[in-house]
């Protein structure tokens, strides 16, 4: 008898986490694998943030917090949204959770009824489609082409919207492509959305500060969009705090209240110590954010210069995040000995086993024929990984 719910049976396993597990298994067996699959900064959390966490322990911030998080942290988030994004929110409109990932899921569970359509530009992060399914929504994929730097057009958005459309998930800078919507491009999408008032925008801005084109743009700043947008962000990427598990949503008060009601029934508040660390991240010097951004930009240039030399690859130079998403269809159909590459998934496994470099199949991001490499690793690792990839790919005939 199958005792697992259909809800879980219908979910796909996270491809990024699966590859990370495979990498760790090979390393445990003594294989020198360079990991380029995980979306995690290789920097340590800045010292002033760690010091704030230590103080919080000494000062006995060890009890349950409000479900929505400490008001002091929510005020700090409001200050960040005002100073960096020009957006006014009250602490009651902000909900802190166990990472931005939880707040994305919370928002969909709070908003979606069975059969509601969730518009998802693809390539998209692996969990978007699965979260929509978990909420019993219907994912509607809008293909963003490499020719348009993986960004959807207003015409595509207009064509995708139906009376059943409820949520648009918009990720900029984007995982996995690194594409970034300019304010003008966001304004053009907003012009379409103003004609469809039933659509709520879920703006995933977790890579906001890792961008190489300057400025911070949010669709919530477009005319008429703030009251229809839920911003999701957090400290994981900008402050190298992935393991601290602090994210937040900011949006209309009724949605925030619904998320608090939901979160209160299955996780309650996030870690009290991690919240105080996040508060220090937002209130302290932002130089650490800029220093890491500059390092990622240098690494972006390094990996792109080397990737453009790999035969069979087509490379879009990303404007943000820390991922490269090359089109590898040029290697499909080639062979090394009796091993034939028949898909991007085959190629990913070939690179893992032949080059000992771990990356992720683009199919997991709804983009078969592409692969994702994370350059959130050292310059030396990037050089070695790309040299291995070049050597292994040149063997394919």
Image (tube, grey):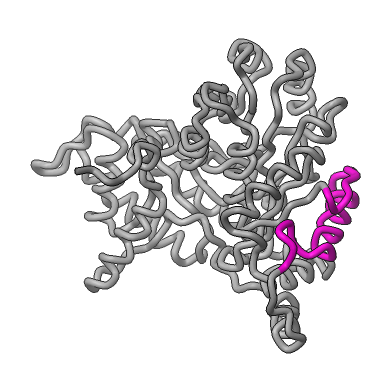
In reply to whether residue 91 is colored magenta, the answer given is yes
Residue at point 68%, 79% (across, down): 62
In reply to whether residue 392 is colored magenta, the answer given is no
Q: Is residue 145 visible?
A: no
Left or right of 94 in this view: 317 = left
Q: In which quarter of the image is residue 163?
A: top right
Assign the magenta stretch its main secondary structure.
helix
Residue at point 75%, 72% (across, down): 276
Where is residue 288? Give x, y as percent: 73, 68
Q: Looking at the image, is 238 positioned above or below residue 110?
A: below
Residue at point 32%, 56% (across, down): 388
Left or right of 395 in this view: 97 = right
Residue at point 22%, 37% (across, down): 341
Left or right of 31 in this view: 76 = right
Q: Looking at the image, is 352 positioned above or below residue 88?
A: below
Q: Looking at the image, is 90 positioned above or below residue 270?
A: above
Where is residue 110? Give x, y as percent: 64, 38
| Residue sitting nearer the eye, 301 or 348 | 348
Residue that lies at the very extreme toward the bottom in this rendered image? 58
Residue that lies at the very extreme toward the left in this rendered image? 338
Q: Quadrant of the C terminus?
A: top left
| Residue sitting nearer the eye, 343 or 62 | 62
Q: Quadrant of residue 60?
A: bottom right
Magenta extent:
65-92
Where is residue 352? Give x, y as percent: 28, 54
Q: Looking at the image, is 167 positioned above or below residue 28?
A: above
């Amino acid at each position: 008898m199958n005792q697992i719910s259909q809800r879980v049976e219908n979910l796909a396993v996270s491809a990024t986490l699966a590859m990370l597990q495979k990498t760790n298994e090979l390393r445990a067996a003594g294989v020198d694998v360079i990991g380029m699959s995980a979306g995690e900064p290789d920097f340590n959390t800045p010292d002033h943030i760690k010091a704030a966490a230590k103080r919080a322990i000494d000062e006995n911030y060890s009890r349950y917090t409000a479900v929505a998080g400490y008001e002091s942290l929510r005020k700090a988030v409001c200050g960040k949204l005002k100073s960096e994004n020009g957006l006014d929110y009250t602490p009651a409109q902000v909900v802190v959770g166990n990472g931005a990932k939880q707040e994305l899921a919370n928002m969909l569970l709070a908003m979606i009824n069975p059969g509601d359509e969730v518009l998802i530009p693809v390539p998209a992060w692996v969990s978007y489609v699965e979260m929509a399914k978990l909420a019993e929504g219907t994912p509607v994929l809008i293909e963003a082409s490499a020719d348009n730097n993986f960004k959807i057009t207003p015409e595509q958005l207009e064509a995708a919207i139906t009376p059943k459309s409820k949520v648009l998930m918009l990720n900029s800078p984007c995982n996995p492509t690194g594409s970034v919507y300019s304010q003008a491009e966001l304004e053009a999408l907003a012009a379409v959305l103003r004609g469809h008032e039933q659509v709520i925008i879920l703006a995933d801005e977790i890579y906001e500060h890792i961008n190489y084109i300057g400025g911070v743009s949010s669709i919530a700043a477009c005319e008429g969009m703030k009251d229809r947008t839920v911003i999701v962000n957090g400290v994981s990427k900008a402050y190298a705090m992935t393991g601290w598990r602090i994210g937040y949503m900011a949006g209309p008060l009724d949605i925030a209240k619904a998320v608090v009601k939901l979160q209160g029934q299955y996780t309650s508040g996030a870690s009290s110590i991690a919240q105080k660390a996040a508060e220090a991240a937002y209130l302290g010097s932002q130089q650490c954010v800029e220093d890491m951004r500059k390092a990622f930009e240098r690494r972006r240039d390094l990996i792109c210069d080397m990737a453009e030399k790999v035969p069979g690859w087509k490379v879009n130079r990303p404007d943000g995040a820390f991922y490269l998403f090359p089109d590898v269809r040029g290697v499909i159909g080639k062979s090394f000995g009796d091993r034939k590459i028949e898909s991007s998934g085959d190629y990913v496994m070939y690179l893992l086993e032949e080059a000992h470099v771990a990356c992720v199949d683009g199919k997991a991001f709804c983009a078969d024929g592409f692969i994702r490499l994370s350059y959130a690793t050292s310059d030396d690792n990037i050089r070695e990984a790309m040299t291995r990839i070049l050597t292994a790919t040149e063997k394919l005939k």
